[in-house]
């Protein structure tokens, strides 16, 4: 499944699963990620799965690139194994105060707001990876007619809970951070909780997300 | 908590970006949580060694200007590492202290860490342990994700820094050492090195880059010759590690540091070798650096040498 393993600096393996970004490639990355994680190899300090890569960081006092590369290449992954997938439902309010970029999306996609939101809510989304900031899920795929580029000038502050789209992907901002995704709404649901050390993040790679629309009253009720 | 036996510092001035740090937290990149931990690991190791603390004891890290603290409790020793100017104010005297030496603090004494010199980070600890909470095995504060003790926030005025487990068998020791920075930063070619034009690749290794003010625990932004991307200014977002140098869409390099975002979509031109990381992070805004190419084998050897050098310094503590 791994096409090639390169070094990323002197203390990380860069495992390449191919150039394609699709659920099949990504499922392989995620399977590999869980398999390596399960082995609990001493001296591996971090695993970062993404669309089509897996980065394995290690402690230079324990391993060298070549010795760890050999170890990883020897791991047997059962290709047939299905991913464990949870279906997670996320409420989203698209009130004018939250849908920061609806007008821009309307213009770029040449679709009416109702149609945009209907298309957005009609699909289930697959979680390719979690990261950039703590707990932020990268979800896909949006249908072709819903795809547009990120903002030309990123926002300095995107409100926490914002739900945005870019290219074939959507995400949820787990914190107030800078960002350039087109914001369609906001979820009152907390998707990252640092005080819950056993399970801080709501969404894991491989999960399926179903967004459902709520009113402002319902939003405020959940937020309480 | 307000018992008579309490030992604590009261923060009179918080300083800039003052936080608790240790060696950081592992195995959380996949949910977006970076290592964090001390920026300058050597100065952290030296501090805990001088104070005869556990090798991963929490320390207080500060940038540019440290905190001004007033101490309450029974006699305690403190030490500061890095290249730092500080004053000790007791009832009897006011005097400047030296880094890598232990000083006594009595009830009511003040410690004013007024600046780091030609460097960014300094470290303070005591012959004992700060009373901190652990999150995923680490007390490092990550202000971006609000993780760590003090609600994941940097120190603020009037905070009380609680001390527990004072080491009574402590003996005063010191090290003669001057913390240094380096201008030549050695790097390994990145996974997207061939995204950039030949002339930009050459410039990257020939010209000076200047550290800008837009640098913090997350990243160091550089200014200099623009790096021309001839392939694709974006890549599919993928994992990052500390020391990775990405080229942003306007052609400027940005180096990922300890609190970096775990995923990034800019091409990677190079990665700073592990041996040079401690000294890289100490480069102040306005200073120049030059990138020098290293092979993977060189980097591994240089790391071993750097570790030996640190161990050698630890053995010189008397």
Image (spheres, coloured by chain):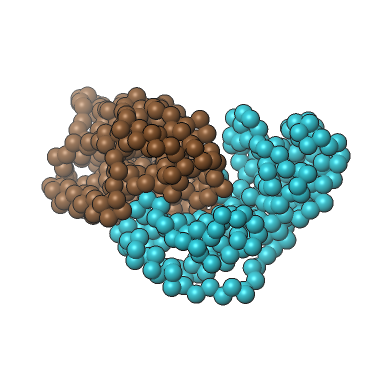
Which tint was used for chain A? cyan
User: Which one is in front, A26 or B88?
Assistant: A26
User: Which one is in front, B207 or B23?
Assistant: B207
Residue at (69%, 52%) from the top-left corner?
Answer: A140
Residue at (34%, 35%) from the top-left corner?
Answer: B202
Q: Quadrant of residue B19?
A: top left
Residue B72 in the image: state x and y as whole percent: 34, 36
Describe residue B232's horizontal placement relative to residue B274 as left or right. Answer: right
Describe residue B21's horizontal placement relative to residue B30 as left or right. Answer: left
Residue A84 in the image: state x and y as whole percent: 65, 68
Which tint was used for chain B? brown
Q: Quadrant of residue A64?
A: bottom left
Residue at (21%, 47%) from the top-left corner?
Answer: B50
Residue at (44%, 69%) from the top-left corner?
Answer: A73
Residue B18 in the image: state x and y as whole percent: 40, 35
> What is the tally of numbered marks visible in this picture?
0
Q: Locate the N terminus of chain A and report the quarter of the image it occupies.
A: bottom right
Q: Is residue B297 visible?
A: yes
Furthest residue in direction front, as rendered: B198
Q: Locate the C terminus of chain A and report the quarter of the image it occupies.
A: top right
Relative to A44, residue A110 above or below: above
Residue A43 in the image: state x and y as whole percent: 37, 63
User: Which one is in front, A57 or B127?
Assistant: A57
Q: Is residue A216 visible?
A: no
């Amino acid at each position: 499944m791994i096409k090639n393993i390169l070094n990323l600096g002197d203390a990380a393996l860069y495992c390449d699963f191919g150039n394609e970004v699709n659920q099949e490639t990504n499922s392989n990355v995620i399977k590999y990620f869980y398999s390596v994680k399960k082995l609990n190899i001493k001296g591996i300090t971090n695993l970062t799965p993404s669309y089509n890569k897996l980065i394995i960081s290690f402690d230079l006092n324990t391993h060298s690139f070549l010795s760890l590369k050999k170890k990883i290449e020897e791991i047997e992954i059962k290709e047939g194994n299905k991913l464990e997938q949870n279906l997670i439902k996320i409420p989203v309010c698209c009130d004018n105060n939250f849908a920061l970029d609806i007008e821009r999306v309307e213009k770029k996609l040449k679709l009416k707001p109702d149609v945009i939101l209907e298309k957005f809510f009609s699909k289930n989304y697959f979680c390719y990876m979690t990261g950039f900031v703590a707990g932020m899920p990268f979800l896909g795929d949006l249908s072709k007619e819903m795809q547009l580029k990120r903002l030309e000038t990123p926002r300095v502050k995107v409100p926490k809970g914002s739900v945005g789209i870019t290219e074939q992907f959507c995400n949820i901002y787990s914190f107030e951070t800078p960002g350039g995704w087109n914001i369609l709404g906001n979820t009152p649901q907390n998707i990252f909780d640092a005080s819950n050390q056993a399970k801080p993040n709501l969404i894991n790679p491989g999960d399926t997300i179903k967004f459902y629309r709520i009113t402002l009253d319902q939003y405020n009720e959940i937020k309480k | 908590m307000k018992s008579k036996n309490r030992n604590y510092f009261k923060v009179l001035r918080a300083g800039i970006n003052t936080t608790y740090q240790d060696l950081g937290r592992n195995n959380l990149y996949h949910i977006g949580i970076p290592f964090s931990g001390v920026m300058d690991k050597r100065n952290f190791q030296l501090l805990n060694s001088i104070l005869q603390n556990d090798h991963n004891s929490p320390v207080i890290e500060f940038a540019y200007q440290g905190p001004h603290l007033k101490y309450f409790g029974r006699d305690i020793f403190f030490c500061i590492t890095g290249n730092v100017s500080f004053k000790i104010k007791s009832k009897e005297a006011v005097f400047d202290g030296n880094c890598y030496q232990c000083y006594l603090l009595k009830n009511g004494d003040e410690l004013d860490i007024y600046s780091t010199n030609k460097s960014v980070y300094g470290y303070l600890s005591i012959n004992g342990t700060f009373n901190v909470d652990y999150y995923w095995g680490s007390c490092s504060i990550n202000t971006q994700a609000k993780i760590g003790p003090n609600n994941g926030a940097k120190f603020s005025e009037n905070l009380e820094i609680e001390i527990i487990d004072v080491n009574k068998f402590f003996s005063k020791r010191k090290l003669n050492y001057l913390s240094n920075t380096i201008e030549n930063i050695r790097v390994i070619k990145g996974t997207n090195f061939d995204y950039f034009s030949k002339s930009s690749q050459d410039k990257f290794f020939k010209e000076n880059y200047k550290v800008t003010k837009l640098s913090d625990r997350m990243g160091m932004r550089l200014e200099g010759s623009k790096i021309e991307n001839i392939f694709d200014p974006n890549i599919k977002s993928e994992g990052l590690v500390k020391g990775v140098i990405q080229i942003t869409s306007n052609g400027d390099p940005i180096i990922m540091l300890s609190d970096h975002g775990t995923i990034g979509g800019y091409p990677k031109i190079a990665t700073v070798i592990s041996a040079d990381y401690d000294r890289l992070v100490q480069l102040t805004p306005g200073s120049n650096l030059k990138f020098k190419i290293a092979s993977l084998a060189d980097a591994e050897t240089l790391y071993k040498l750097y570790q030996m050098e640190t161990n050698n310094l630890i053995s010189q503590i008397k």
